[in-house]
Amino acid sequence: MSDTGGAVAEESMFSMLDLFILSGLGGFAVYWFFFKNKKQEQPTFKKLTVQPMTGRDRDPSFINKMKSSGKNVIVFYGSQTGTAEEFAGRLAKDAVGYGMKGLVADPEECDMDDLQRLPEVENSLAIFCMATYGEGDPTDNAQEFNEWLQNGDVSLEGVKYAVFALGNKTYEHYNAMGKFVDKKLEELGGTRVIEEDFVTWREKFWPAVCDHFGVQATGDQVSIRQYSLTTHDDIPKEKVYKGEIARLGSFRNQKPPFDAKNPYLAPVQVNRELHKGGDRSCMHIEFDITGSKIRYEAGDHVAVYPVNDPEIVEALGKRLDIDLDTVFTLTNVDEYATEEKEKEFLLQLSSSTPEGKQLYSDWIIKDHRNILAILEDLPSIKPPLDHICELLPNIHITAVVIKYETRTGRIAKGVATNWLALKKPENGIKPTVPIYVRKSQFRLPFKANTPVLMVGPGTGLAPFRGFIQERHFAKKDAQDYIYEDELNDYVNDGTLTKIHVAFSRDQEKKVYVQHLMKENKTEIWNLLENGGHIYVCGDARNMARDVHELLENIIVELGDMDKAKAADYVKKLQSKGRYSCDVWS
Ligand SMILES: Cc1cc2nc3c(=O)[nH]c(=O)nc-3n(C[C@H](O)[C@H](O)[C@H](O)COP(=O)(O)O)c2cc1C
């Protein structure tokens, strides 16, 4: 196979769709690689069930685990918000259709030195589903693996691997982590190659595995669903998970250290509106972390685990005739659609053909159909409850309350923000929210008097408040002018030299940060030449790109350089930590 270039796609609702049938969907920008050597040996193919390896049955030797459970495919994931983890689960399940046995593993819970021993398992294959964050950084659970690869003093001779990278094209360091893992594994001994979006990738992947091992697929159209429902009415309430992330009872019995798998139930101290009118809402929320031993530094990220809108959950239960208090465990199922037409439609929707991708983009993405909307519009579809639970959307954090009308006339609401909006302290009672803190590279320069330029439209202002407060301590139109009084105070006391505000939502005069930067180009150039730092926070898709382009243009004009030299100048700023971006799309 060869590298075909150009991965695709936007953020999506991938998780919902596969729900009904098939192999994945075009949804994520995916970059993948695969080995190319052909071997003749025959693997032993048996039927299997896939079990995730969790912290509870922790044996850091995944080789022992593979041997004892008879698995020959191990799928590692580097995941922050669950997408890569979900992909890993799907790939491990896929293996069934090809008579192989799959195991999902979190690199953080494994001794990665064991990778050298993979050839001890007959016909073995390691797949890596890796997401990228920040400035090409690994996810939290892949940090150690990243360092292990960087040290790179092992031989992976004989290790067959495939890397499947998850990312988003709007970021400069597109799929950096996946690319790095692939490159490193190859340097250490492995091989591969192909690059595609997930739908196409998955279709080509398993035939390629069969080809590699010189065997044939079973030919059966294996349903992706592995599990059916067994309900229980004899399990005591305290033995049932009620939203805890990993440890049963961890919400009742809170123990530090707090992290992604053990979030802290932080009391909401303040929840107030920042906009001074209009119908948009931007929340300011303060969590009390006293006594939690959580360390927060300006620039770090706070992650929140929200709960789904009870109205949607209730409607889903009703639509599927499910008692939502059911306690259940899982084992295998088949088809869900009884109407042949609806089945055909879903098959087309999830196919890798251009028409399938177009339909997906139109019917799912542009119409903003969530799980409930899909089920409402395709009445013959009856997936089991456990599958729905597996596929509920992941968490995204923003302080602007998301609510809009879709093309089908439904009101779509952001899960996290609408849930958070209700978390208001009242009469001395503070509602709690499961959170954890993720360290970031977004930091003020060490020297307190280094000049800095901070570009942060909208909620991009958030980390800068932390920065300004830090400096403040060291020193000892608009409806959406958020934190106006606070910022003016900082100008008055000299913590900030200047504030330029742009109101892009102003109907008459739309001003963007880019315009203001252009107007103040001399000031920016002087700041750069005097060792200043630039920070950009907020929208990655347009704003951060435009700002980058604009910086280069300012340098071309005032630094009297050609475009290539200016680009170089900016690269140097980045590598010296003088130009940092914390952006999202
Ligand atoms: C704050 C943030 C930063 C990101 N940075 C990058 C990046 O630098 N490069 C990239 O290719 N994708 C980037 N992404 C996209 C994610 O890698 C992508 O959404 C991925 O599917 C997330 O996988 P996960 O849910 O398993 O964590 C970023 C996403 C967020 C929310």
Image: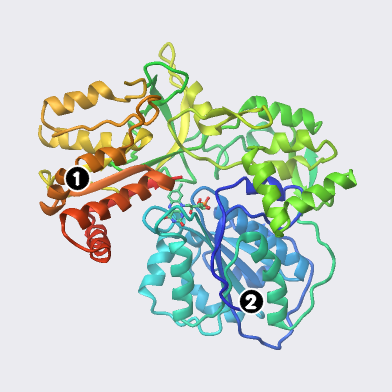
Locate the N terminus by quadrant: bottom right
Mark 1 lies on a secondary structure that is helix
In which quadrant of the rendered view does residue 457 lie? top left
Task: Please give left or right for residue 99 compared with residue 57 in the image.
Answer: right
- Which amino acid is tagged 2? Ser
Q: Do we see residue 19 in this rendering? A: yes
Task: Please give left or right for residue 471 compared with residue 575 in the image.
Answer: left
Residue farthest toward the top in the current orientation of the protein? 427
In which quadrant of the rendered view does residue 8 lie? bottom right
**Residue 479 locus on image (x, y percent):** 36, 20
Count the labels in the image. 2
**Frontmost residue, 101 versus 53:** 101
Residue at x 36% of width, y 33% of height? 458
Residue at x 10% of width, y 34% of height? 475
**Frontmost residue, 210 versus 361:** 361
Q: Residues within 10 Å of mark 1 (few under 14, many from 20)?
A: some
Residue located beneath label 1 in the image? 521
Task: Please give left or right for residue 331 compared with residue 549 in the image.
Answer: right
Pointers 2 and 1 in contact (CB under 8 A)?
no
Residue at x 41% of width, y 45% of height? 542
Snapshot colouring: rainbow
- Which amino acid is tagged 1? Lys
Relative to 292, say whether 183 is above or below. Answer: below
Residue located beneath label 2 in the image? 124
In which quadrant of the rendered view does residue 77 lie? bottom right
